[in-house]
Amino acid sequence: MQRISLTARCYFFAICLSLAFCVPAKADPGAFHAFLESLWPRASAQGISRATFTRVLDRLSEDPSVPIAVAKQPEFERLLSTYFKEAVSPTRVARGRALAQTYHGELDTVVSRYGVPRGILLAAWGMESDFGRDRGDKDIVRSLATLAFHRRDNDLFSNELLSALVILQRGQLTRARLVGSWAGAMGDPQFMPSAYLKYAVSYRGAGVPDIWNSPADTLASIGYFLRASGWNPALPWGMEVVLPKDFDFKTLHADFRDFAAAGVKAANGAAMPHGNATLFMPAGAGGPAFLLSENYWVLKAYNNSDSYALSLACLGDRIEGRNGLRKAWPQHQKLWRRSEKIEIQHLLTKLGLYHGTFDGKFGQASRDAIHAFQIEARDAPADGIGGPGLLALLHAKADAR
């Protein structure tokens, strides 16, 4: 179901992967430059000249702040509701609405061109760089070279470094323009170099896309990326819904109209569209409930996180003037540690219900497996989330096998 673009998801996985590398006690310039030189055959194969390769990389040194940034990343899970409240803040909503007025003409054009709603365009801009106020000021060539050196077991960062060299080889941008986050993401939409090459577009249809200084280019590039990733203009991202008191939770997947026939109603009173829908209750049956369309998974192509995608979607709604959530987040929610989530995934696998990776992330595959277990164990409501007793119940069922 999740159609994730490898190029676009680089920013998300770059951060996740970089968390794992070990920070050396002391940099080794010789080893660093030997590694960079080892990239020459791959660079040459991509049309990068020896002159460009040498000019950009010959005097490059490691960026010591990159390992420090990695080491300072929080190693704990956050409730989706906590992330949501910070992301969909009144300040960000107000800023998005003000920019909607400032760039209403450009937004009209981008919406017409790509079919992505203006609220989603603005929300993505806000989520990625706080509307250009937090795009980063790192030399991304240096950052990517440092990350690539420390993650030699994975080609992700070296591929992005080579994409940056391609940009410079083509003369599209000067080295001074390649600035962004310590993870290598650039400009207002926070595109990695490979994503810039593939998805950055000029609003006017000519010239080099300027995602640092041109809001029009930023909005057009976001619109093009989402449309290229599969955005369907005929569908909303989804909607908050109200479940009937007697809802049986027998399935999390059906057509929107099937959910409507079961008594599920849009919280804003809108009619249900046609198309496949997924019922998502991020805080369990006691919190807000959403029906997600295929477009929701397109938002996850930007960042493969439910916290991110749901926040972006609801921020877009708020920017466009729609009300906030009808149902409040529960005051007390179970916060599973990552080790506990991995344990749950192993137990679900033992019971034949889960076939994914043991990553400690509860995506849709994990929620479907939990839902199937809840149905089998008659653990109501079967919301795909489970309560504090889920782990103990799983142990009991797995031990009885």
Image: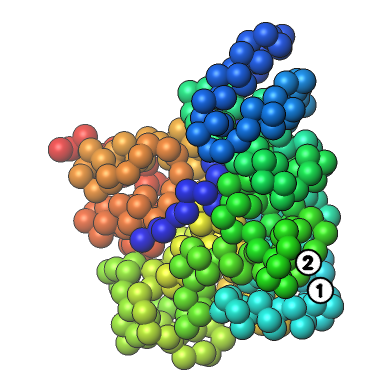
Within the image, what quadrant is residue 83 found in?
bottom right
Amino acid type at image mark 2: Pro
Q: Is residue 116 above or below residue 14?
A: below
Q: Position of residue 262 (x, y in %)?
A: 32, 83
Question: Decide: marks 1, 2 in contact (CB < 8 A)?
Answer: yes
- What amino acid is found at the position of numbered circle 1 in the picture? Leu
**Is 280 on the left-hand or right-hand side of 207?**
left
**How many tags in the picture?**
2
Instruction: State the CA–CA distance, disc 1 to disc 2.
Output: 10 Å
Towards the viewer: 341 or 74: 74
The x and y percentages for residue 247 are 35, 76
Give the labeled residue for mark 2.
215
User: Where, by quadrant of the figure, is residue 88 drawn?
Assistant: bottom right
Is disc 2 placed on a helix, strand or loop? Answer: helix
Vertical placement of 177 versus 131: above or below? Answer: above
* Residue 103 as seen in the image, left or right of residue 282: right
Using the image as rendered, state which of residue 7 and residue 288 is in the foreground: 7
For the point 44% across and 73% down, the residue is 293
Percent across and percent down for residue 149 are: 60, 22
Q: Which mark is residue 99?
A: 1
* Picture quadrant where residue 165 is located: top right
